[in-house]
């Protein structure tokens, strides 16, 4: 039996104007968990789409060997028949079907053309136990959390007798507890002989779960090394092609005048009558500062941001002052015109139109700036878009490129440019580095610093404590719709923030 369950040799792939992969060689040892890392745009997803049959044989150069034999995959079904199953970051479960129906969708257990419901139920129970889930197979998927759905996707792959699991950013939307559960299950499966390829920007997970790591940069294989021979600094250096001695480029500042004041801000929960989603929130954002907002998932961080721009719930009481002027925004458009802009956490669903090109996305919120009497000035649109492509160092062959074809980090830069074109006074960034690599994160942090020094005031909402501690001048902590604590940069640490995130403000007295 071959030591390598998989070999990809000399894989090259071109898209219009771009060489996405250039002679990539990649080998996976049977029974190992193999990490695949690289900046957004390094070629990880393209490589895995070739392996999964999403890009069929003939659309790329090079060879795929499974168990030592060359394989030609014409589609995903061919790859699955070879024992390869990929679980994408955007989960592909049908919410209106049961767990059992999802697991065996397209791979139904049937006799004489009739689905065997009893066998499906029993087999589902067995597979769910393998991934640590004690659920009724008839439960509808739509009512389950993201963490559980991720495990169901793994169960679905196991139902196809997959020998090789590919997990693409599996914890991007998971809580710490859900992540812990997933990593425990993957370790258990590896001990049973299941091989996996683990793609993640979270290097702590790479070091915890993998045996070997391959690093890609600009579509080429840079290194493949045992995980124990690496550390975080080495991986980052290989990924970005340079040393990054300061992951978080903190800049000390003297706060200026109040730019955004929120007083006794209470907002009704639109789903639960009589309940306050935000309860007497008080805070001030000054000029010349980055203000961080921390807290566990579900405590109201995003709801606070959306309510300030008129995009969430009914404001029951409270006042909002923007640069000293009392405001109450009924729509996001009103907030934009006043200079309060919000970059949503879901850039693909809410922040960008991925079918539009770069210039169209950039100018979408500021069409009046590139128009005259309702007529678009296309030359001006091109000039402004080109200016921000250069200013934000967006990697693209053209501003005519569809935004959906860009890497996650470059998509986030397009979303930032969209709001910078509106000339805001206050910019709220919700999870601005989610799902992007360390090199792109570093660039986003520097952009935030540059924006503040150019006169903007920035609020950064993040679930990653290290980046809040490393970038923000001040940090607020939320607990169940309230501000539970405030720390200066020098006062803050992970222990204090977590204590404030888990305790009611009245319990901390």
Image: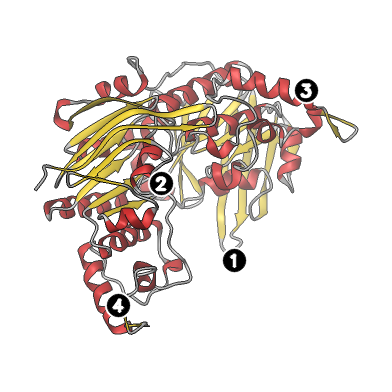
Residue for point 68% across, 43% down:
319
Disc 3 to disc 2: CB gap under 8 Å = no
The answer to which of marks 4 and 3 sits earlier in the sequence is 4
According to the picture, the residue beneath numbered tag 3 turns out to be 380
For disc 4, the neighbor class at 10 Å (few under 14, some 14 to 19, many from 20) is: some
The answer to which of marks 1 and 3 sits earlier in the sequence is 1
According to the picture, the residue beneath numbered tag 1 turns out to be 274
Disc 1 to disc 4: CB gap under 8 Å = no
Q: In 3D space, how far apart are the residues under numbered discs 2 and 1 (Cα atoms)?
A: 55 Å
Residue for point 28% across, 72% down:
124
Residue 120 tag number: 4
Residue for point 20% across, 64% down:
130
Nearest to the eye among marks 2 and 1: give it. Answer: 2
Which residue is outermost to the right? 373
Which residue is outermost to the left? 1
295 relative position to 447: left or right = left
């Amino acid at each position: 039996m071959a030591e390598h369950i998989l070999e990809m040799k000399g894989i090259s792939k071109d898209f219009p104007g771009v060489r996405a992969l250039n002679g990539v060689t990649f080998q996976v040892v049977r029974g190992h968990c193999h990490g695949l890392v690289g900046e957004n745009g390094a070629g990880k997803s393209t490589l895995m789409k070739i392996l999964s049959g999403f890009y069929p044989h003939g659309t790329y150069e090079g060879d795929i060997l499974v168990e030592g034999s060359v394989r030609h995959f014409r589609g995903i079904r061919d790859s699955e028949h070879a024992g390869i199953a990929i679980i994408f970051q955007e989960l592909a479960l049908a919410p209106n079907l049961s767990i059992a129906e999802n697991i065996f969708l397209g791979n139904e257990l049937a006799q004489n053309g009739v689905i065997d419901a009893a066998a499906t139920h029993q087999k589902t129970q067995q597979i769910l136990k393998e991934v640590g889930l004690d659920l009724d197979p008839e439960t509808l998927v739509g009512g389950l959390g993201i963490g559980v759905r991720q495990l169901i996707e793994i169960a679905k792959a196991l139902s196809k007798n997959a020998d090789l699991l590919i997990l693409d950013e599996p914890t991007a939307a998971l809580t710490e507890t859900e992540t812990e559960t997933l990593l425990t299950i993957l370790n258990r499966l590896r001990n049973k002989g299941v091989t996996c390829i683990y793609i993640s920007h979270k290097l702590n997970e790479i070091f915890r779960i993998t045996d070997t790591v391959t690093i890609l940069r600009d579509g080429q294989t840079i290194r493949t090394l045992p995980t124990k021979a690496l550390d975080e600094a080495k991986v980052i250096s290989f990924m970005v092609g340079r040393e990054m001695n300061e992951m978080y480029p903190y800049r000390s500042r003297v706060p200026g005048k109040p730019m955004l004041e929120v007083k006794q801000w209470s907002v009704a929960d639109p789903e639960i009558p009589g309940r306050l989603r935000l309860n007497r929130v008080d805070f001030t954002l000054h000029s010349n500062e980055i203000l961080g907002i921390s807290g566990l998932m579900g405590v109201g961080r995003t709801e606070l941001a959306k309510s300030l721009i008129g995009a969430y719930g009914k404001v029951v009481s409270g006042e909002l002052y923007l640069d000293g002027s009392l405001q109450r925004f009924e729509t996001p458009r009103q907030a934009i015109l006043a200079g309060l802009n919000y970059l949503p956490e879901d850039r693909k669903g809410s922040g960008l139109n991925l079918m539009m090109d770069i210039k169209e996305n950039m100018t979408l919120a500021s069409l009046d700036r590139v128009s005259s009497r309702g007529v678009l000035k296309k030359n001006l649109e091109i000039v402004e878009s080109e200016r921000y492509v250069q200013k934000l160092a967006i990697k693209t062959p053209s501003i005519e490129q569809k935004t959906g074809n860009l890497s996650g980090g470059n998509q986030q830069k397009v979303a930032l440019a969209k709001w910078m074109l509106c000339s805001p006074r206050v910019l709220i960034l919700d999870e601005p580095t989610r799902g992007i690599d360390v090199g792109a994160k570093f660039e986003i942090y520097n952009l935030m610093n540059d924006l503040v020094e150019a006169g903007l005031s920035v609020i950064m909402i993040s679930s990653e404590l290290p980046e809040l501690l490393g970038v923000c001048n001040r940090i607020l902590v939320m607990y169940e719709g309230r501000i539970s604590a405030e720390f200066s940069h020098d006062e803050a640490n992970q222990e204090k923030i977590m204590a404030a995130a888990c305790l009611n403000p009245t319990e901390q007295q």
